[in-house]
Image (spheres, coloured by chain):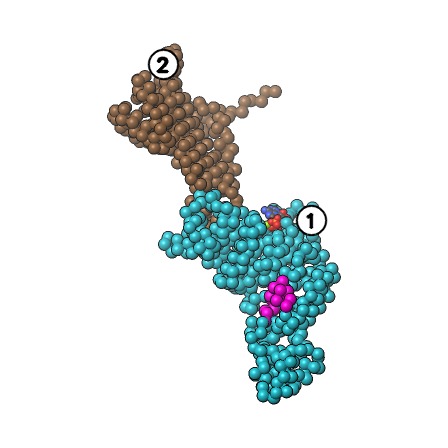
Amino acid sequence: MDTGPEIIRPKMQVRNLYKVFGSSPETALKMLEQGAGKDEILDKTKQSVGLADVSFDVYDGEILVIMGLSGSGKSTLIRCLNRLIEPSRGKIIIDDCDITQLNNIDLRNLRREKFGMIFQHFALFPHRSVQENAEFGLEIQGVPKEKRVAKAREALKQVGLEGWEDSFPGQLSGGMQQRVGLARGLAVDPDILLMDEAFSALDPLIRRDMQHELVELQDRFKKTIIFITHDLDEALEIGDRIILMKDGRIVQIGSPEEILTQPANEYVSRFVENVDMTKVLTASSVMVRAKTVAYPKDGLRTMLHKMRDVGISSIFVVNRDKTLRGLITAQSCKDALESGDKTVADLLLCDIPTTTPDEPVTNLIGRMADANLPLPVVSAAGKLLGVVVRGSLLAGIAEGGLELETTLEHPNEGMAQ
Amino acid sequence: MNFSKFPLAEYIDTLLDFLTDHLAWITKGISEIMSTGMDAATDALLAMPSWLFILLVAAAAYKAVGKRMALGTILGLCLLDNLQLWEPTIETLVLVLIATFVAVAIGIPLGILAAIYDGAHRVIMPLLDLMQTMPAFVYLIPAIPFFGLGPVAAIFSTVIFAMPPAIRLTSLGIRQVPADLVEAADAYGCDRRQKLLKLQLPLALPTIMAGVNQTIMLALSMVVIAAMIGAGGLGGEVWKAIQRLQPGKGFEAGIGIVILAMILDRFTSKVGRNKSADQ
Ligand SMILES: Nc1ncnc2c1ncn2[C@@H]1O[C@H](COP(=O)(O)OP(=O)(O)OP(=O)(O)O)[C@@H](O)[C@H]1O
Ligand SMILES: [Mg+2]
């Protein structure tokens, strides 16, 4: 199931990346290849394993979340991506260029052009004003004063810090400081934003705001964002895909839903067991196949027959290519046949509520509570993917919860027809 | 147990002889130029009436530090004038300022080197330990063959004696810049120079200024000691008093040194703190 973003060519490809901290990584690398664990290697060689055989793609315009317990190598990984930490082995390809091969000057230029980075403890420059902090990246790039002032101002505005330009970081609250950090990253208009636990120093309310802001910014500017967090709820809130790490290795990569409903192993399920399922299940995971559908060419009689056949009281009308046209109820069919003066087009209810496949179930519960018609799930292109009925919704929630105990048995039914 | 004495002294003498033979023409030249310059500076300051000089310093003190400092400066300097120590005071001041200037001009770049390159750090730090524990008098001896008796030799030994804190605290200040800030600078693509100018030096400034302050204090104490090789100034007055067994005169000159020390200290320590308070 591909719930990733639509553009398929990866922005960034990481291939077989290793990092061993220590003076002689070679033996450790060999042992890693033979599958030795981190503790064993530390015991035998005194080398500390940061990353072991990490491979993944980052798609253009996605928010990729990296999770894992403390010491699992998240920070090491994100710092390898812009070579703040030098990888011991492996490739990192960004837009067809293997950046592990770059010399110092090219590397500096790459960092200036492609990356923005936002840090857990903000890492703002205390001797520079908010404005000057936001300008920093542009200043380093040698952008003329006027232009960088304007750009930094705009970035500060985006994060809601208008009017604070002349303050110093020390005079701001934590949340505001983090916004300055975000503005510093956004001002350089980078392709890729690297965020290492960028929100963990914030209190929950501000954190929530920042998450929303980030998703919104990402929506508007289509940045590629790589985001580390300890907090599963945060990962589920903002992540398009999640990478779970353990002892320097990737344990699972997948959409939030896949991680939750099909955990690859014990480690992953332990990670996810406390999640409120209703928050993360989406319409696509609780929808069912429409039992039958009608086509515009079908006469009223055919439609009524189809409904009787499977025992439903209304039917969705779709084109041959499954584009949803509307809904017709059995009652209106019967009435029309008796009076005999109406066509399908007259009876068709076009303006019916629909939902998208990635709508969280939480939102559906409210909408379904007082509806007795099924809710069609419609793709961005307008095609009918399936329907959510009250029964399937409740069953989905219950099952999703149970699925965490056992693995791989998720009734992952395909789309409608 | 009759190992013959290891001829360390002889080796050092040989080395110094070699250096004087081959370098003396340079050092003597430097000596000429510097003493001319110093004399000119001293003469210029002495040409100014003492009250004008006192007022200027007091005004600077008022601006840089405050009212009390200005008042103290006026009282202290007037006392020195009254004790007829004006000329040696100015001589000492010029010596101290020149020696400090040279020590800082060499010390800060060395400190930056030691901060950036671990190799330089490993070489420089033990040397500093050596320089600081060596008794100050020892520096006087080789200064003479290189520069001849007089104020330039005094400045030379003073620079060596007073430089370590400038190096040490510059290096310390830069190394103390939080690693996450350095990382942030790297992440945005700073080169070495940008990192130094935009981040490390501004953040290290208070520490560097503390180093400069210590350098000035050490320079003052060394300039006094250097009276033994003809540095003149207030130290010269003390030295004369010792030779003539005149404790009263010795104390007068000693008080002069204390006053000068206090003024210089307040000036520099305040400047360092002002800058750091901006943050
Ligand atoms: N400079 C270093 N020298 C030696 N070992 C290191 C170094 N940096 C990281 N490590 C090791 O690499 C492993 C991964 O560290 P990393 O900082 O990437 O973990 P993390 O997943 O970011 O943890 P946290 O959630 O606590 O931030 C750890 O076991 C750590 O001990
Ligand atoms: Mg970390």
Determine which quarter of the picture holds residue B229.
Answer: top left
Q: Quadrant of residue B251?
A: top left
Horizontal and vertical percent position of residue A334: 65, 84
Q: Which chain is brown?
A: B
Q: Residue at x 35, y 28 (%)?
A: B67
The residue at the point 46 percent across, 39 percent down is B204
For label 2, the residue is B249
In the foreground, A239 or A383: A383
The x and y percentages for residue A369 are 64, 66
Image vertical order of residue B10 relative to residue A272, above or below:
above
Secondary-structure class at tag 1 = helix
Residue drawn at the location 61% of the way across and 88% of the way down = A340
As drawn, A148 above or below A1? above
Q: Which chain is cyan?
A: A
Residue sitting farthest toward the bottom:
A340
The vertical placement of B32 against A404, above or below, is above
Q: Are marks 2 and 1 on the same chain?
A: no
At 43% from the left and 46% from the top, the residue drawn is A167
Q: Amino acid at mark 2?
A: Lys
Residue range (magenta): A354-370
Q: Is the C-beta of the residue carrying label 2 under 8 Å from the nearest atom of ligand 1?
A: no
Q: Chain of mark 2?
A: B
Q: Chain of mark 1?
A: A
Q: CA distance from mark 2 to mark 1?
A: 75 Å
Residue identified by numbered label 1: A39
